[in-house]
Image: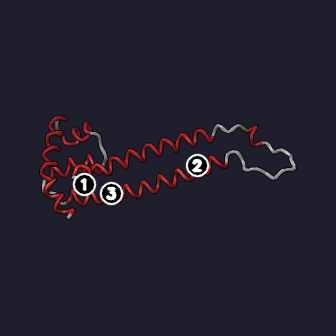
Amino acid sequence: MAVKEFLERALHLDGAIDAKVAELTHLRELSLKIGTSNLEERVTHSAPKEAPFAKWVERIVDKEKEINTEIDKLVDVKLEISDFIDGIDNPQWQSLLRHRYVLCKSWPDVAVEMDKGLSTVFRIHKTILENLEKIFQNEIK
């Protein structure tokens, strides 16, 4: 695994969690659309069936568990990345990497935080990756 792939794991997990949260929001919205006519009590001689909203509640609970599992993974990955960044002795490099890969900020936001132009941030990032690749390969072994 290259240093960039190692660092980008948090970004990928963060994006996946955002997508699952959006899916959860959608499930909750759908669950609110259950009509009251479906909830009326009907007298029949057959065994009672599951309430129509039960499947939505189950889906919502399952999605929440899935999201919580992903959040736990994200925290672990961010701690691992943060520990790696702490081992770098250049404060500017630490700042750039922490803003991008631990705080998951966009490149324009990283540039603002560092008070640099976007192209300068990209150039610094490229330099960081080139220099860290050697260090990273030694730490992984």
User: Along the polypeptide, which appears first: circle 2 or circle 3?
Assistant: 2
Q: Is residue 140 left or right of residue 14?
A: left
Could you say whether the residue bearing mark 1 is in a helix, strand or loop? loop
Q: Amino acid at mark 1?
A: Met
Q: x, y (%) of residue 62?
A: 55, 53
Q: Residue at x 39, y 57 (%)?
A: 73
Q: CA distance from mark 3 to mark 1?
A: 14 Å
Residue, disc 1: 1
Residue, disc 3: 77
Q: Which mark is residue 104?
A: none
> Closer to the camera, 27 or 86?
27
Q: CA distance from mark 2 to mark 3?
A: 27 Å
| Quadrant the N terminus occupies | bottom left
User: Along the polypeptide, which appears first: circle 3 or circle 1?
Assistant: 1
> Closer to the camera, 91 or 126?
126
Q: x, y (%) of residue 19?
A: 44, 43
Q: x, y (%) of residue 109?
A: 27, 39
Q: Amino acid at mark 3?
A: Val
The reply to whether dot 2 and dot 3 touch (C-beta < 8 Å) is: no
Pointer 3: residues within 10 angstroms few (<14), some, or many (20+)? many
> Closer to the camera, 141 or 115?
141
Residue, disc 2: 59
User: Along the polypeptide, which appears first: circle 2 or circle 1?
Assistant: 1
